Image: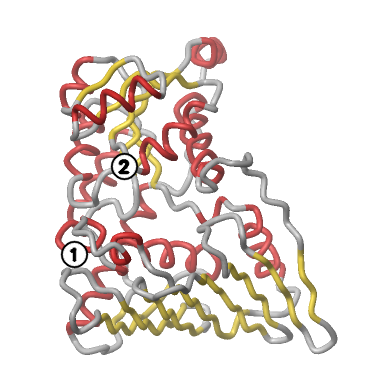
Amino acid sequence: MNLLIIIKKIMKKLKVGIIGSGFGLNCHFPSFRQNRNCNVLALCTKNAIKGKKLAKKNGIKNYFNNWKLMIKSIDLDIISIAVPPKDQPKIVKFCLSKSIPVLAEKPLSISLSDSKQIYLKQKKNKIPGLIDFIFPEIDIWKKTREIIQKRKFGSVKNLSVDLNFQSYTNMKKISSWKNNINMGGGILHHFLSHIFYYLEWFCGTISSISVKLNKEKNYKFTGHTKAIILLKFSSGTTGIIRASSNNYGVHEHILKFINDRGTIILENRKNDWVKDFKLQTIDNKKKKYINVKYKNKKKTDSRIYPVSKIVNKLVNWVIYKKKESPNFKSAVRVQYLIEKSLLSNKLKGRWVSAKNFT
């Protein structure tokens, strides 16, 4: 890329618009605000009264309650989207039709066809676009992957993921997209999308899958709250995921990698999604805790730190034209695994191939 063009782009701040007043305002907005190459100019939310107050409170100059009007009214360089998965594809497609780079939330959509259309549009027109899979951006997770890939304890033979917590909407019995399967809610879309992405990041391609989804007998919402998933990887590794989003007084996110000559454990047993992970390695001689300092600013949402890493990647892609990840191809792969999971569950847990993905 021409050096003069790069210098001009760096000197001229990228104009950013945020769509969504929840995670979008709590994490996307501060992540863009702390990037020196960005200026957040616009906020779009459904609730106009609340949205105007939030825009004013956060020093955002322009407010809209219609996302299409926002995009047509201001010449924006990046759109950051944090809306329910069912609503996201139409916004992303519109942005790409205007050649505007996008930061999107996971999962990208609730259908494989929508996700594929988005990816192919992005690929054809070479428009920067990233998806917000945050866990691999955490430093202690990167250290865990480094240990696995260096094979200090040999190859991973078996792995397990235990994710048990009580979601806010389940605790308060609130009707929300997060517990509505038709909006992209429930444990499979909303939480296991993260797990599918990071397990392939750790251990390579999942080749087949066996899934059983369930929910409590008197649970009044449509989204599943429980999942047991068996996995086979192309490498020969096997695995199991046990997940539940309706546990009283329990919050744990535990990954175990059983290797030829030892075990690697990455665990968080505290009520914070990001900052409280501990890494432990065990071999036949000793247990060892590996300390990796968490770098998020104090008294801020801990999720801002990994989100800001993805924002920085997107900004660099826009300025320097260097492709980054996690991109929309990764989002399509995760959507493929979600649909294979739904198929396996429909077949009462029968093994389903997940390898032949195009």
| Vertical comparison of 67 with 348: above or below | above
Query: Which residue occupies 32% across, 21% down?
Result: 42
| Residue 333: quadrant of the picture | bottom left
Tell me the distance, in whole angstroms, between the alpha carbons under discs 2 and 1: 17 Å
Secondary structure, mark 1, is helix
Q: Name the foreground residue: 318 vs 281.
A: 281
Query: Which residue occupies 24% across, 79% down?
Result: 215
Determine which residue is flagged by label 2: 82
| Residue 14: quadrant of the picture | top left
Query: Which residue occupies 20% across, 15% down?
Result: 73
Residues packed near mark 2 inside 10 Å, few (<14), some (14 to 19) or many (20 plus): many
Q: Name the foreground residue: 236 vs 83.
A: 83
Q: Horizontal and vertical percent for residue 136?
A: 54, 56
Q: Name the foreground residue: 351 vs 38.
A: 38
| Vertical comparison of 271 with 257: above or below | above
Determine which residue is flagged by label 1: 181
As shown in the figure, which amino acid type bears the numbered disc 2? Ala
As shown in the figure, which amino acid type bears the numbered disc 1? Ile
Query: Is residue 275 found left or right of 198 in the rendered image?
Result: right
Q: Are marks 2 and 1 in contact (CB under 8 Å)?
A: no
Residues packed near mark 1 inside 10 Å, few (<14), some (14 to 19) or many (20 plus): some
Query: Which residue occupies 35% across, 34% down?
Result: 80
Q: Can you tell which mark lies on residue 37?
A: none
| Residue 91: quadrant of the picture | top left
| Vertical comparison of 41 with 254: above or below | above
**Scheme of image coloration:** secondary structure
| Residue 218 shows in this picture | yes
Query: Is residue 35 found left or right of 56 in the rendered image?
Result: right
Q: Horizontal and vertical percent for residue 353?
A: 31, 79
N-terminal-most mark, 2 or 1:
2
State how many labels appear.
2
Q: Name the foreground residue: 210 vs 235.
A: 210
